[in-house]
Image (spheres, rainbow, N blue to C red):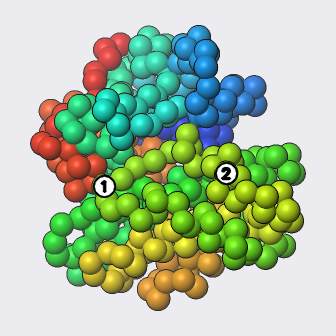
Amino acid sequence: MRPDDLYIGLISGTSADGIDAALVSFDEPEPKLLAHHLHPIPTNTRARLISLFTPDHHQIDLMGELDVELGRLFASAVAELLALSDTSANAITAIGSHGQTIRHRPEGKHPFTLQVGDPNVIAQLTGIDVVADFRRRDMACGGQGAPLAPLFHAATLAHDRENRVVLNLGGIANITWLPAQGQPLAMDTGPASGLMDSWCQLHRGETFDDDGQWAAQGAVNQQLLAGWLADPYFAMPAPKSTGKEYFHLEWARSRAGALFDAVDPADLQATLLELTARTATQAIQALPVAADRILVCGGGVHNSQLMARLQALNPCPVADSSTVGIAADWVEAMCFAWLGKCHIEGRKLNTSPFTGARDAVLLGGLYRS
């Protein structure tokens, strides 16, 4: 018998390499991942998306086109997931869709965040109600708009006898501090796979450094690393959030000067990996109580070089979140299924420890099918 309380979560992360779609049951006290699907984003679409990540002029038409194009791809991801799981659209209560972030500017006089992947298109093509646009409501309440996944981490991965850190390694790295006692907090720590992927694409024509093998061939350049680590973002206190519009290759070049072009490409890749490991560890070790366990999720769990470096820098165990029952590759998609459920049920969420929002708020907007 199929559960009744079914939701679908959708997200395209900062790497923009595909759409994660998760079918989640909330019949039991703990959410259960019933099926999942990674829907590829075509190469041409991905290239145009990535061009939006770096500020430039005359991007409004491209943004509008990609909003609809991504909406159709998100709807296709739902159709594939339903077919793979032999599930009827009528069985789904709602879809929680994060979309694809193309700009995130939490600082300034008028903070804003933009995601594409039109929920109107998704609702129309799937025949399922869609909850979307989660981040802007948080910003309207004085929050950074990100990270939101810590809400789900706190609901599913906290432990009353263990101080845990959840480290998400996507294009950007973020941590969620889940103490056994006391107030949780979260922040984006800086770049993760985004910079490494961009450098790998530029020099090897590959979308990512498989298992960190290319980085393993290089050596960390300490002068280069020191220049990057001096960026003021890393010393900022939480709550803080960032994105690829800040941490991109031009950022890396601008802080390195002539050294950027003088360093061997494999050494630069090794140094980018070290930057990710060091900045995540720096944030973890600045927490008020030492962590007992670091649970890693996101695509970075498949980079054994990065995982090994994180373990070497941290005295506590560093493990895949799958070891405690939440599949590492699907945490964020499950999160947005859960956020969709919270909206449908009218649950206001307190994002203050994670984003700095002033009040508990009903995240997202509902788009009826």
Give x and y (percent) for residue 97: 41, 31
Find numbered disc 1 in the image and state the secondary structure of the residue it sits on: loop
Q: What amino acid type is highlighted by mark number 2?
A: Ser
The quadrant of the picture occupied by the N terminus is top left
Give the camera-side residue of 294 and 254.
Answer: 254
How far across and how far down the image is residue 157, in percent?
A: 32, 65
| Tag 1: amino acid | Pro
Instruction: Give the SS element for disc 2.
Output: helix
Where is 49 relative to 244, above or below?
Answer: above
The residues tagged by marks 1 and 2 sit, at their Cα atoms, a distance apart of 26 Å
Disc 1: which residue: 239
Q: Which residue is mark 2?
A: 254
Residue positioned 28% across, 81% down in the render: 289
Decide if residue 337 is in sight here. no
Q: Residues within 10 Å of mark 1 (few under 14, many from 20)?
A: some
Which residue does the image show at 32% across and 17% down from the upper left? 367
Looking at the picture, how far across and down is residue 73, in whole percent? 59, 23
